[in-house]
Each structure stands twice: as C-alpha cells, then as structure tokens.
Amino acid sequence: MPIGHPSFGRLFRCECKVRDEDQKRGEELRQLSNLDAFADLTFETFDAEVEGMVDAYEEAFAYAREPDGWLFFHGPCGVGKTHLAVAIARAAMVEQKMSVLFAVVPDLLDHLRATFDPGSGTAYDDRFNAIRNAQLLVLDDLGTENTTPWAREKLYQIFNHRYNERLPTVITSNLDFKRIEERVLSRILDQRLTRFVQIDAGDFRTRSILPPHRGPRSPRR
C-alpha cells in the first residue's frame, strides 16, 4: 500500500487465504452437523396439515428463506421441532450457501470436549470460534445437556456472543423454562431478537399406533 494509506505497514491475510479458511471452517461444520443422516427431514416431507403445526411450518419456511435473528421452537416431544430445525439447516446450507452447524446440544458440547484429545487435529479455540461464529447455528434439544459448571459456561458464552452479534440462531426445547439457565433464557426470550413459536400438537411417533378418539360411548340399553 502507498504511504498514507490506512493499511500501510499493516500485515493482514490476503483474500484468497481468508476464502480458503472460510471454506475449511464451513466443511468442518458440515461434517459436525452430519445432516446426511437426516436426509428425509425436509420441508417437502413435513406434514403441515396436522392440527397445531401450520404456524410452526410457515415460520420455519420463511426463516429458512431469510435467516435473520433467532427462532425458538418450544413444545413437547414428537411434535416435529427437530424436523423443522433440520429442514431450516438444510435449506440455508443448500439454497443460501451459508456455513451452518446443526447439533443436538449435548453433542455440541462433545464436539468441544473432543478437542481436548491431543490427537484430535483441531485446537479448542479454533472449534469454539467456528461454532459461535457459524453463519447459522441450529441447536436442538436445549436443556438435555449434562449441566456441569463447564457446560453451562460454554453454552452461555456461545449464546451471549451470538446475542450480542445478532447472529442467526435456531433453538428447540421441550423443557419447562425453569430448567433452562436464566442467563441463556433471558436472551432467547428477548422479543427484539427472537421469534417464539409454541407448538401444541400430538406426538407424531404415536399417531399411527394409538386408536382414534371416538368420544364417549353411549350407555348400553
């Protein structure tokens, strides 16, 4: 750079090096996400006609087209929260070309712990920064993690960073809010950033085996 230029005398990475590093981080996140194991969980295969699911489907579909802010799905087991979260992750990765990390929260913490092994080939700081700076982070089953002090602190650091930077984040949980750490919950429920979707529907895993409800029987005569 010429004398007088703001970057004169400064050392910084060239654009090609930055691009290569971004691609490397994106590939690492793709491998950690293991979305190939959820190939059948797409918007096309989601049954949005089930009572109580239309609003959740529409919110997820719109968010996948324009990931912005946070999206929080809350509801009981088996209502399709994970299906929608995976569908968002896949769509953002394929259609928006974003670097995406999808992880069940206990697995996310395991990804961090794995770097403590000297043979892992990945430094802890590199993985932690890749996770908290992913263009889209999709966290499934918040609250199911083993709540050690270390786990609570790492999750808080991730949520706090993404909250401050307003990075697109999708969260699912089936737990009572009292079981989610207050510091994290306060950020998730901030209506200036988060779209909250409460899902009230039946467990799809049991729909095909439970007999239909036919109402009360008439007394025999």
Image (cartoon, rainbow, N blue to C red):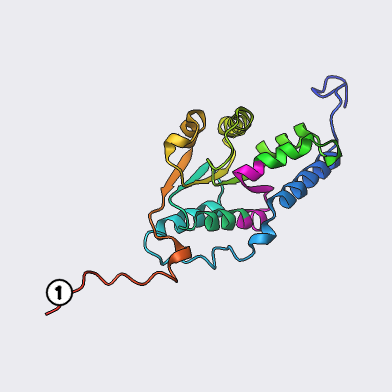
Pick the residue in front: 138 or 200.
200
Q: Residue 95 at x, y = what percent?
A: 64, 58
How many C-alpha atoms fall within 10 Å of the one at disc 1: few (<14), some, or many (≥20)? few
* Viewer-nearest residue: 8 or 218: 218
- Badge 1 amino acid: Pro
The answer to which quarter of the image holds residue 207 is: bottom left
The percent position of residue 210, horizontal first and vertical second, equals 40, 69
Image quadrant in which you'd find residue 4 = top right
Tell me the element at label 1. loop
Q: Does 51 sit above or below residue 5?
A: below
- Above or below, 140 against 160 in this view is below
The reply, left or right, for residue 170 in relation to residue 150 is left
Residue 24 position within the rendered picture, expressed as x and y whole percent measured from the top left:
80, 46
Farthest front residue in view: 221
Q: Which residue is mark 1?
A: 219
Query: What percent of the width, then of the height, locates residue 100?
Result: 66, 48
Question: Does 103 appear in magenta?
Answer: yes
In the rendered image, the vertical position of residue 200 relative to residue 218, given as above or below = above
State the quadrant of the C terminus: bottom left
Q: Is residue 149 magenta?
A: no
Which of 208/54 is in front? 208
Left or right placement of residue 31 versus residue 144 in this view: right
Q: Quadrant of residue 48?
A: bottom left
The N terminus is located in which quarter?
A: top right
Q: Would residue 136 be seen by someone viewing this image from the given angle?
A: no
Residue situated furthest bottom in the rendering:
221
**In this picture, which residue range is highlighted in magenta?**
90-108
